[in-house]
């Protein structure tokens, strides 16, 4: 009998050694669930990190002078126009210079930027004049009419240079119908002027004004014109809602 009970005990030990505890199963399931949740969280964090627009990334990569930093919204609009004009074949594939005049700013500040989009750097940052009848220190009135002596907002493509009454000058082709497309006929050009200077502003409380041309400091004019001539883009910005909502070049 002792031998019989011994055999029975041995069989019981062998069979129960293959029994899997329910607790062990639950524990393993918990481990798997935890791992899945962690992977999901990591993926969400990655998506959040990459949700930055290409225009914002480009803007952040450009080293602006902290005291004369271009507004991002203005830059974004200029870049949209640049890309649309390229798609339309009005700018060449080699075009990589973007000139922006922010006429919402005081004329006593450096409100013109020439940006090299390839090298992601500011090539020029300077004063720029608006038209005599556009306003005093601040621009308020714009026109596309001859003899108005007012500035015209919108996108321009730089053309050829010439020697005129104001010296070395750059012809501009207005791209916005009804807003600046009369620029060539009106002789709206970029040129240098002695009245575009801090010295003039110190005496007159503002820099001088042109007859509608984006005039720049005399000492910078030749080098700036030679840099941006030949089918590059110039954008004269002003927060006019009629223009901003109707320009074909600002359509995203």
Image (cartoon, rainbow, N blue to C red):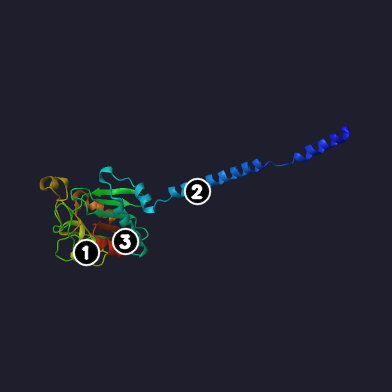
Q: CA distance from mark 3 to mark 1?
A: 19 Å
Q: Quadrant of residue 65?
A: top left
Report the mark closest to the observer, 2 or 3.
2
Q: Residue at x 35, y 47 (%)?
A: 60
Mark 2 or mark 1: name the one nearer the start of the chain: 2
The residue pinned by badge 3 equals 250
Report the mark closest to the observer, 3 or 1.
3
Count residues near mark 2 (Cα–Cα under 10 Å), then give few for <14, some for 14-19, many for 20+: few
Image position, residue 204 (x, y; %): 11, 48
Q: Secondary structure at mark 1?
A: helix
Count residues near mark 3 (Cα–Cα under 10 Å), then give few for <14, some for 14-19, many for 20+: many
Disc 2 + disc 3, Cβ < 8 Å:
no
* Circle on res. 110: none
Q: Quadrant of the N terminus?
A: top right
Image position, residue 29 (x, y; %): 61, 45
Count residues near mark 1 (Cα–Cα under 10 Å), then give few for <14, some for 14-19, many for 20+: many
Q: Secondary structure at mark 3?
A: helix
Q: Nearer the viewer, residue 227 or 122?
A: 122
Disc 3 + disc 1, Cβ < 8 Å:
no
Q: Specify whether residue 160 is in view.
A: no
Q: Specify whether residue 12 is in view.
A: yes
Q: Quadrant of the C terminus?
A: bottom left
Q: Nearer the viewer, residue 130 or 247?
A: 247
Q: Residue at x 44, y 49 (%)?
A: 48
The residue pinned by badge 1 equals 183
Asked if residue 244 lies left or right of residue 51, the reply is left
Considering every residue shown, the one lying at the far left of the view is 203
Q: Quadrant of residue 240?
A: bottom left
* Circle on res. 43: 2
Q: Is residue 159 above or below residue 13?
A: below
């Amino acid at each position: 009998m002792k031998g019989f009970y011994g055999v029975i005990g041995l069989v019981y030990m062998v069979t129960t050694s293959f029994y899997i505890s329910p607790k062990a199963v639950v524990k393993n399931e918990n481990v798997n669930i935890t791992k899945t949740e962690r992977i999901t969280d990591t993926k969400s964090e990655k998506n959040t990190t990459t949700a930055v627009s290409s225009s914002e990334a480009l803007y952040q990569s450009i080293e602006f002078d902290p005291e004369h930093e271009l507004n991002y919204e203005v830059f974004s609009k200029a870049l949209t126009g640049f890309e649309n004009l390229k798609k339309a074949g009005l700018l060449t594939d080699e075009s990589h210079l973007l000139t922006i005049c922010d006429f919402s700013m005081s004329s006593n500040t450096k409100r013109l930027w020439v940006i090299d989009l390839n090298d992601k750097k500011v090539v020029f940052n300077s004063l720029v004049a608006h038209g005599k009848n556009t306003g005093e220190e601040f621009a308020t009135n714009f026109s596309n009419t001859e003899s108005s002596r007012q500035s015209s907002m919108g996108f321009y493509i730089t053309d050829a240079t010439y020697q005129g009454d104001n010296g070395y000058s750059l012809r501009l082709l207005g791209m916005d119908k009804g807003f600046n497309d009369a620029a060539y006929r009106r002789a709206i050009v970029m040129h240098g002027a002695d009245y575009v200077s801090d010295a003039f502003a110190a005496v007159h409380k503002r820099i001088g004004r042109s007859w509608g041309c984006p005039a720049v400091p005399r000492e910078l004019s030749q080098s700036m014109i030679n840099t941006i001539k030949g089918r590059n883009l110039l954008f004269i910005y002003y927060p006019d809602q009629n223009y901003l909502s109707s320009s074909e070049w600002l359509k995203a």
